[in-house]
Amino acid sequence: MREITFQQALIEAMREEMLRDERVFLMGEDVGLYGGAYGASKGLFDEFGPERIRDTAISEAAIVGAGVGAALTGMRPIAEIMYIDFTGIAMDQIANQAAKVRYMFGGKARVPLVIRTSCGSGRSFAAQHSQCLEAWFMHVPGLYVVMPSNPYDAKGLLKTCIRDDNPVMFIEHKMSYKMKGQVPEEEYLIPLGQADVKRAGGDVTVIAISTMVQRALKAAEELAAEGIEVEVIDPRSLVPLDMESICNSVKKTGRVIVVHESVERSGPGAEIATRIMEEAFDYLDAPVKRLSGKNCPMPCSPVLEEAAVPQISDIIGAVKEII
Amino acid sequence: MAHIMIMPLLAETMDEGTIARWMVKEGDTVKRGDPVVEVETDKANMEVVAVASGVMLKIVASEGTTVPVYEPIAVIGEAGEKLPKLDTGSKAQETAEPKRTLKEQAPVTLPEAAETMATDQTRIKISPRARRLANDRGVSAEALAGRGSGPGGRIVERDVEAYLLEEPSATPLAARIAAVEGADLSGIIGSGPGGKIYSRDIPAGVSASAAGEVIKLAGMRKIIADRLSQSAHTAVQVTLTSEVDMTSAVAVRGRLLPAVEKAAGVRLTFTDIIVKATAMALSEMPLINSTFDGEEITLHRDVNLGVAVALEQGLVVPVIREADALGLAAISASIKGLVEKARQGKLGAAEMNGGTFTVTNLGAFGVEAFTPVINPPQTGILGVGAIKEKPAVVDGQIVPRFMMYLSMVFDHRVMDGADAARFLQRIKSLLEQPELMLV
């Protein structure tokens, strides 16, 4: 199968959906002529022109607000927020408008809006451009939260999100864009709420999110050499969350570590661990462990940045601690 | 306060139960709701749970004894507590000594683990998964104390598994005798080196004769023997046999397989189809769907169909309630569920009582026709033979057809040959033209 990058997978997904449905369009800061801050809309401007690939002002509230309005009037917008750190400016539009409108109009209004945004550390962008804030959106009823970990998932999930009639936070890790992976030429979709077992194993379940999936897989490889079999599960969407797959794995292994880059306090690991305790308590052979970003603002220094988020060696250490 | 455990009434028809196995010893700590003893009844072996938390003060009924329902089998209370007077033939030990404190008593009667517990005043750390396995296998957390290999000394699954593997060491002959007789080796101290159990260490009465194995008739086997001889000696059993052309049913089953698989996730069998046809015929002929106690014939409104299942320990007949109201997928799923429960020994009394008719199929063993024995107080039973492709004459031509024998055994005291024949004929036509089941 051919290999393409995460960034190309996103472009393909948007291009295919724009060809399929003329209501789909993209807007955001520098998504047009420049091709996106991470090149994730390269070529789309040339093909579709300024009407459907729209450069906006530097105003996140306006980007999402216009997206909600367009969605309500029958369009299927993709709104890009360059850094998830900036969603704070658009939060009223996301949490109070996009997420609530369908409910408050008794299902008569729909908001088919995808908010694409980037998250994460790794480039020394410091505390205001490096955060993982998926937990903010998991907390708001009415939003889907999707975090792909490889090109294949990115393409299949983004296409599903564009076709869905509800608002989605589609969160891409900024260190993923150059990642290469196998993606078939033919069309496919990945449903929301379907976790993927990235590696099977019987000793410990590692539930990893976004770039932590690749780290967990590398850790699992090293641990396998020592005879420890790790099962790596990627939930792919945090809302909806595939508890069935997670519990099936817990029933098998009895031990779970949830790994994510976002800070530990009230992070996605807290939610996942609680639900495991509620739904699979009798199968646990050890307390559920969280391995997450430190409870601190992201440092700018590359050394400290690395120390603030889980590394492969941390995952190996956590597995050995729990087993 | 001491609590007396009695032989519970586990099924409507139960008069007595035999103690198959005690899972605890005298002096063991028990928890209310934990299984402590396995009781053999006429239907099945069932676990009986502790009625209270405390110490197993006295086991009144030892393994192998048969006890009438509601009679005492054990006493649970606080360590050192005076035993209450027991209303049984056996002499209950009474002690005139004043009640002692737990601390004084502990070194004498409590197992080591419990003593550690009492002095440490700490909770035994055990993971939910390990606790679940321990509960399932009748192992108390206290018995596992000190064995934890998890972080902080927590008892984890592998520790329970290791504990369960620690079978007492025995010679192959002793182990074989114990397995055949169902003897519990854990209660025996062997006379061999390191306490190894020899065949001579197994209590008398539990031994293999030189001529071969001697199997004492007990429990399930005894009940089967009693009930079948009662049936054979009282019911006037007459057998009618009819050959059924199953060619259409074979085709229908083939077509329905995917639909039933989709609806109920099970594989449709011929037994399922025969059960459906039988249930339909029974609903039309109340006289066959009856029970007889020697005085009165009861015609039942519900068709509760028993399906005979052969297990290693013997025959059980789980009952499908209101089978005439169920579709094929539901019948199929119901039979598979009951058979699986029967295999695991988890069939409850409620799932075996109240049958109004029985179907038994030996076709899988290649049996062509046979005469089963009525399961009293029922008045009929249908024996199903193997489906075989053989030459048959259809419209003057010899053609291959799928043929099967059905044997209807009925109690002539309740009905006449013509009644049973009409019933058999009805099942035959339902199976030969399965579309009639849609009418």
Image: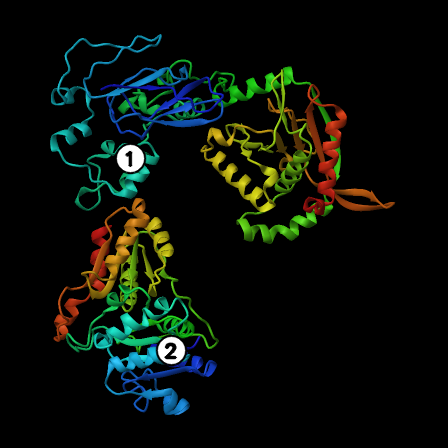
Marking on residue A10: none
Residue that carries the numbered disc 2 in the rendered image: A71
Mark 1 and mark 2: Cα distance apart in space: 62 Å
Horizontal relation, residue B364 to residue B11: left or right: right
Res A7 visible: no
Q: Looking at the picture, how far across and down is residue A137, in whole percent?
A: 27, 67
Q: Looking at the picture, how far across and down is residue B389, in whole percent?
A: 73, 43
Residue that carries the numbered disc 1 in the rendered image: B163
Q: Looking at the picture, how far across and down is residue B87, in whole percent?
A: 33, 10
Q: Residue at x 55, y 53 (%)?
A: B262
Crowd class of label 2 (few under 14; some 14 to 19; many from 20; radius 10 Å): many
Q: Residue furthest front?
A: A105
Above or below residue B46? Residue A106 is: below
Q: Looking at the picture, how far across and down is residue A55, in whole percent?
A: 30, 88
Q: Residue at x 41, y 74 (%)?
A: A159
What is the secondary structure assignment of the residue under circle 2? helix
- Select label 1 or label 2 by which is in front: 2
Q: Residue furthest right?
A: B396
